[in-house]
Image (cartoon, rainbow, N blue to C red):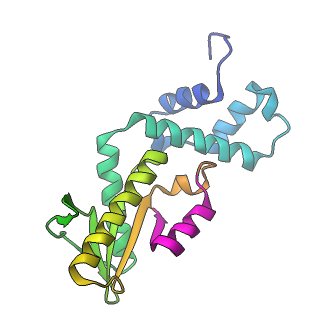
Amino acid sequence: MSNGTKFKKKDFVREYIARVDGFDNIDYDEMLREVRPLFKDWESKKDKDIIRWLKQYVYQISIEQEDPEYEKEFWKAVIVFLKNSKHEVEDGEPPQKCGGINQKIDVLSKKGGITYLTEVKGGVGNYRLQTGIGQLLFHQFGIEQKSGDLKNYAFQLAFPKLFETNKHFYHEFAKYLKNKAGIKIIFV
């Protein structure tokens, strides 16, 4: 980077994050000014496209770090988001038996007579998406076995807002998931 050797865009973002002392201090306009002259293939790109790519790199780096404190803070942010959306957040229920597997929901809340079961995923990748879907399907199964009816329940996966614009997130799949499995994805 500063040593004159060739480096990747993601390496530049990693160095920038370290230089500004963390994710909370990122200035995408400043990063854009610094990065544009370093990569020939970005010289003709629109600013908004480069910033979108930079955000994806930032997101990937944040996931790579797998910071347990970040997970905990994101979980708290989901609770605040739900409360701001007029949900009554509950402490949770004891784990349900679902085909011999104990399941515990991350966040249980109520709004307008509907009980919401929210699985919180502080990072996104195929594994986390698949895990979240599987967890919610187990909850659906357990509730259906217990009460025979899902009409007063809503199931959702909460992901960081940054993932909403990530090229690896497929909005068509999110629509399919909601329509076919009754699982909504929310971004916080």
Residue projecting furthest to the bottom? 113
Residue shown at 41% from the left, 63% from the top: 157
Quadrant position of residue 27 = top right
Residue shown at 37% from the left, 38% from the top: 66
Part of the protein shown in magenta: 169-187
How far from the left and from the top, in percent, is residue 152?
Answer: 33, 86
Relative depth, front residue between 42 and 63:
63
Relative depth, front residue between 127 and 68:
127
Relative depth, front residue between 65 and 104:
104
Residue projecting furthest to the front? 99
What is the quadrant of the N terminus in the image?
top right
How far from the left and from the top, in percent, is residue 57?
Answer: 58, 38
Residue shown at 71% from the left, 36% from the top: 33
How far from the left and from the top, in percent, is residue 176?
Answer: 57, 68
Above/below status of 34 relative to 90: above
**Residue 183 is covered by the magenta coloring:** yes
